[in-house]
Image (tube, rainbow, N blue to C red):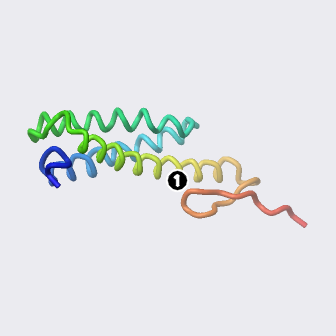
Amino acid sequence: MSELLGGDGGAFFGMTVVLFGVAAVATGRAMAETWRPAWQIAPAVLGLAAADRFLLFALFDARLMSAGGFAAAAALLALITAGSYYQNRARKMVEQYPWLYQRSGPFGWRAKAEPQ
């Protein structure tokens, strides 16, 4: 596992999941709150993953140019960011347009039924 991640698994978990996971949640929330399109998740995640790799390299002596480590971090951070984005966007749609929409699960909304 250490070979794939380019360094220690514990450092990867602590830095990527805990520290950058919180940053990914905040990024997804901010993008949803400002009505950004979903495609902007990708460049934001690439920036987070690059910063994650650099800090793992600088603080924990991990390999900087680890393709596996970068891909694992980017995939994990993309899941966290997208989850936060879609959850907050659904909440915002229902709060902003309560006469049109109601919640439909944690990531969606649906049109309210027409009154009879």
Q: From what the image shows, is residue 2 above or below residue 64?
A: below
Looking at the image, which residue is at 33% across and 37% down?
Answer: 48
- Which residue is at 42% across, 46% downward? 81
Circle 1 SS class: helix
Query: x, y percentage for residue 110?
Result: 70, 58
User: Looking at the image, is 96 positioned above or below residue 105?
Assistant: above
Q: Amino acid at mark 1?
A: Gln
In-front residue for pair 4/51 = 4
Q: Quadrant of residue 98?
A: bottom right
Q: Using residue 16 as the reference point, say whether residue 60 is left or right of it.
A: left
- Which quadrant is home to the C terminus? bottom right
Horizontal relation, residue 100 to residue 2: left or right: right
Circle 1 crowding by C-alpha within 10 Å: few under 14, some 14–19, many from 20: some
Which of the 4 quarters of the picture holds residue 105?
bottom right
Read off the residue under disc 1.
87
From this viewpoint, which residue is outermost toward the bottom? 116
Residue 39 screen position, x and y as percent: 52, 37
Image position, residue 3 (x, y; %) = 15, 49
Residue at 23 percent of width and 44 percent of height? 69
